[in-house]
Image: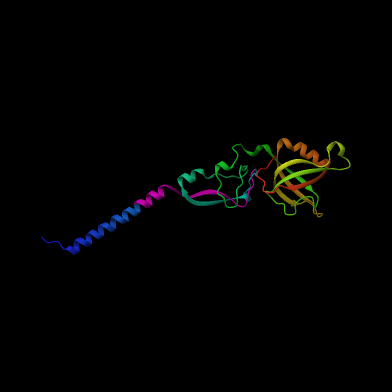
Amino acid sequence: MRFSRRGFGSSAAMWLGCLAATGALVLALVAHQSSAPGIRVWTAARDLPVGLVLTKADVEAVSISVPQRTAQLLLRTSPIRQRLTRVAPAGALLTGADFARAPATALRLVTLTVESGRAPAALSRGAIVDVWATPTATWDAASSGGSRRVASAVVVAAVSRADPTGALAIKIQIDSARVSSLIAATHAGGIDIVEVPDAAAGGS
């Protein structure tokens, strides 16, 4: 029996093609198994400062495909009402390490009514500010030493207009232990809000 060289060459090419296709399939399966396709993770919807307790407006859920090792680091559960421990720029993927282990139960939200011109005009949620109280006639200015800072590097949770005069209602996050002294100071004198530029901490 005689074999055709042409037939043998065609068969060899066919087998080589099958082997190549099989190898590509195996590689694709391995890559698929080592990745986490379509997992639901969370990103920062805007620039978020450290210390901010997150709301729905601060984050966005997205579906991405990443390696398994990376997927294990990313936050898979809702970050709502969790307190950030680092600055998160807009679009950043959030990880479990970005949040305080303990719930933000030690924080309270206090609303301050601030007269027009005594707070930055463009103040918005996420800003870091100091709160200053200035003595009025009913406050003992001599013992107080004049204007004093009553809260340092606190996070602004919300800003809205309080009344037609231009006064603002500024809601800030503050540790529960500081609430009493803050309220006492704000009722005894006028309030000024001073923004802290490029702040790295908040909530004290």
Vertical comparison of 66 with 174: above or below = below
Q: Position of residue 29 (x, y in %)?
A: 37, 50
Q: Position of residue 193 (x, y in %)?
A: 76, 47
Q: Position of residue 60 (x, y in %)?
A: 58, 51
Image quarter of residue 155: top right
Q: In front: 141, or 77?
A: 141
Vertical comparison of 29 with 152: above or below = below
- Residue 43 in the magenta stretch? The answer is yes
Q: Quadrant of the C terminus?
A: top right
User: Where are the magenta residues, as a range?
Assistant: 26-50
For the point 31% across and 56% down, which residue is it? Answer: 20
Decide if residue 147 is on the left or right side of residue 88: right
Does any portion of residue 34 appear in the rendered image? yes
- Residue 28 in the magenta stretch? The answer is yes
Q: Position of residue 151 (x, y in %)?
A: 74, 41
Q: In front: 140, or 102?
A: 140
Q: Residue furthest bottom?
A: 6
Q: Quadrant of the N terminus?
A: bottom left
Does any portion of residue 140 appear in the rendered image? no
For the point 19% across and 64% down, which residue is it? Answer: 6
Q: Residue furthest left?
A: 1
Decide if residue 1 is on the left or right side of residue 150: left
